[in-house]
Amino acid sequence: MDDRGEGTGDRPSDWLDDWQTGRQVSTRGRNKVVLAAGMLSRSGEALDRFGGFVRYLITNHGYQLGDFLEASYNARQDGDGWRPMPYDTSHCEASLSEATANVGRSLRWYRALLPDDTRYHLLGYSLGGVAFFEAAGALLYGEPDRWEGRIGSIMTLSAPHFGVDLGLEGDILGALGLGALLPSGLSVQELIKRGSDPRHRVTVERLATWLRAKGVNLLTLADPKDVVVTAADAVIAPPSERDWHVLDTRTVVSFGEGRMGVPLGHGPLLNNTLAWVRMAKLIGPQQPRSA
């Protein structure tokens, strides 16, 4: 699909070069949806992961392909600051602090590229959700003048905010060949350590409360059948509200996820249409800028 194929009345000045070769970003709409894929992904794959939701927003809410941006887990420093760079699976397995820093650098790069009143909606799957949540906190805390009112929402799908506790399912996957089904880099080791640290849970809940107080809409969705990230690890909400965030995807066929960089049993939520509806409601329709 051509990046310019969805717009009407566009001028050359309405388009800017993205950090990914061959992609362009539209300036016509004020809302931008920034995507971050999870473990085992490569640059350029986030649009594929969220392809169904992207088409849903384009068809029903006035968006075009150039309204969707991608965060990178890799960046390079040059004379103008940090620039997102193509990444591969090895960058996903670096430390969580490095992954979060590079996602934050991607957001800063887009912030410098696009008009000042652009509103960013962050949508992350798995590792991408964790990185967006923590990067947004760092940006709003460290650069409030630049970011307050600019991050409209943070939406995460099967993101291990509280760490990972694989439990019995993890033992089973290990017996079947853990290395073949799940990544095992530094970021995963850190997530496993977080899963057994009650202090981390408190930190996450406090950050979520602070982000909401700053005007950020937070939506953390989980799949009860996920064998990698449980709902208890993914949902940030008061106990009385957590069930609303858990969406059953038993009707979604998800074989072949491993081939797409999604571990088996850890991807159906990407294609859950109820999740699309809830995320679209949070983002809202596109707001065109006047010519």
Image (cartoon, grey):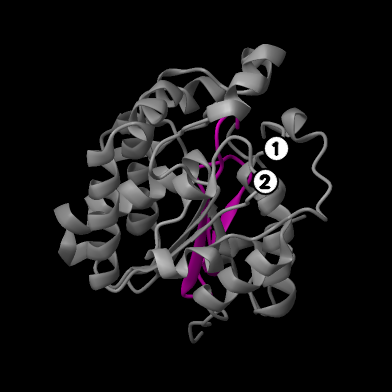
**Residue 66 placement: quadrant:** bottom right
Please state the horizontal and vertical placement of residue 269, each as a whole percent of the image: 67, 53
Where residue 265 is drawn, which disc sits there?
1
Quadrant for the N terminus in the image: bottom right
**Is residue 212 rendered magenta in the image?**
no
Of the residues tagged 2 and 1, which is closer to the observer?
2
Q: What residue lies at 51% left-to-right and 17% top-to-bottom? A: 184
- Would you identify the image quadrant in which residue 58 lies? bottom right
Residue sitting nearer the eye, 202 or 150? 202
Give how far across and how far down residue 114 sits, in percent.
Answer: 40, 62
Can the viewer see residue 106? no
The mark nearer the N terminus, 2 or 1, is: 2
Answer with left or right where residue 95 lies relative to residue 258.
left
Image spot of residue 131 (x, y percent) = 39, 43
Q: Are marks 2 and 1 in contact (CB under 8 Å)?
A: yes
Q: Is residue 154 above or below residue 262?
A: below
Which numbered disc covers residue 225?
2
Above or below 44: residue 212 = below
Residue drawn at x 65%, y 39% is: 266
For mark 2, give the secondary structure.
loop
| Chain part drawn in magenta | 13-41
Q: Which mark is residue 246?
A: none
Displayed quadrant of residue 191: top left
Question: For this view, does 244 lie left or right of residue 173?
Answer: left
Q: Determine the residue positioned at 30% across, 59% down.
A: 208
Q: Mark 2: few, some, or many residues within 10 Å (few <14, many ≥20)? A: some
Residue type at the position of mark 1: Gly
Which residue occupies 52% across, 62% down? 33
Secondary structure at badge 1 equals loop
In the rendered image, residue 28 lying in the magenta stretch gets the answer yes
Which amino acid, by three-letter code, is at mark 2? Lys
Residue 214 left/right relative to 106: left
